[in-house]
Image (cartoon, rainbow, N blue to C red):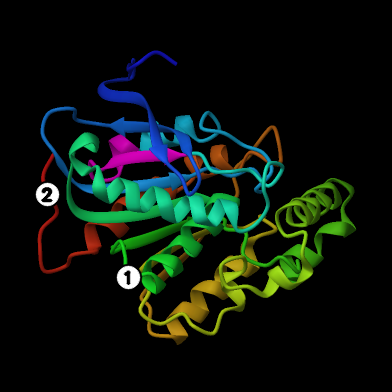
Amino acid sequence: MSEMDQDLANPALQVQPLQVAGAEGTLDARLYKASPDGKRDVLIVFFHGGGFVDGDLDQPDDFLRHLAVDSGCPVVLSSSYTKATVKPFPAAAEDAHAVLVWARKHKAKLGWTGKRLLVAGIEAGANLAAVSSLMARDRGGPVIAGQILVMPMLDPGLTTCSMREMPTCSDKARLYNECAAAYRGYLPQPSDRSHPYASPLLSSRLRNLPPALILTVEDDPLRDEAEAYGAKLVHYGVPATVRRMPAARLQEPNARNECACQVHALSEIANFIAGLDKDEPPSSC
């Protein structure tokens, strides 16, 4: 990618490659700004999917271009993280928290006022978004205004009904095996599978977390664990909105980013951002 490019469909959108600080070194990142002039009140830090062992910044690129334009004019920072093939848990989780800390310290570079910091992700990246919210609470910052979890991976045991039903179908059995292999790579030590920074769904310390938007899809095997996490957040007093989106027709069953872009995720995210400060009108673009 060039130093900065523009979306032909949205000439005002600028996309810029960056280097951000992870827990143990620099990480590749990408900055999306729908309106280059002036600073924005909302920054979304986004982590890609790939089952902790795969994926890159290109994977959610199309979705994030839409997100930057259609969700209330935030700045979006898409960051990579250490894959489990390089170093397993907790390396990716530590990177996620480090990126949030970096973003807070470098708000001027990002064109962000520092007002509202949101963390988001899809699949394994959504796990990191949920986990980094826990870490920010436990470590005294940075303050997270909201967490957006799109089809999150939250249950290393693969015990939910929507996941257990998968092996009855040959194609879904492949997805089940891929999820199992991903967790084996990310959590090679069995004892880590119950750690709240690996499986927030198992945590009993979920109070005082930021409001959450959790998006699932009717035919997604991660549906039940995502919805269970939303119910658990509500039980602990955390505002959580859970939406089950209709399934989209896809050429590839693993195309979760494409799925999120095709259905209702963008409008749900825009509504979530607009509702974070009910006593204060959203900043105009």
The residue segment tinted magenta is 68-79
Query: With respect to residue 198, does 27 lie above or below?
Result: above
Residue at which label 1 appears: 140
Q: Residues within 10 Å of mark 1 (few under 14, many from 20)?
A: few
Query: With respect to residue 230, does 84 lie above or below?
Result: above
Amino acid type, mark 2: Ser
Residue 184 belongs to magenta span: no
| Helix, strand or loop for disc 1 | loop
In-front residue for pair 131/276: 131
Q: Residue at x 41, y 73 (%)?
A: 138
Asked whether the beta carbons under mark 2 and mark 1 sit within 8 Å of each other, the answer is no
Quarter placement of the C terminus: top left
149 sits left or right of 169 in the view = left
Q: Is residue 268 at least partly visible in the picture?
A: no
Tell me where residue 200 appears, x and y as whole percent. 56, 71
Q: Earlier in the sequence, mark 2 or mark 1?
A: 1
Q: Image quadrant of residue 5?
A: top left
214 sits left or right of 272 in the view = right
Query: Which label is found at residue 283?
Result: 2
Q: Residue at x 54, y 85 (%)?
A: 204
| Helix, strand or loop for disc 2 | loop
Q: Image quadrant of residue 110?
A: top left
Query: With respect to residue 197, does 180 lie above or below?
Result: above
In-front residue for pair 87/234: 87
Q: Residue at x 57, y 58 (%)?
A: 152
Q: Residue at x 55, y 37 (%)?
A: 258
141 sits left or right of 39 in the view = right
Q: Is residue 40 at least partly visible in the picture?
A: yes
Query: With respect to residue 274, does 262 lie above or below?
Result: above
Tell me where residue 158 appears, x and y as whole percent. 75, 66
Amino acid type, mark 1: Gly
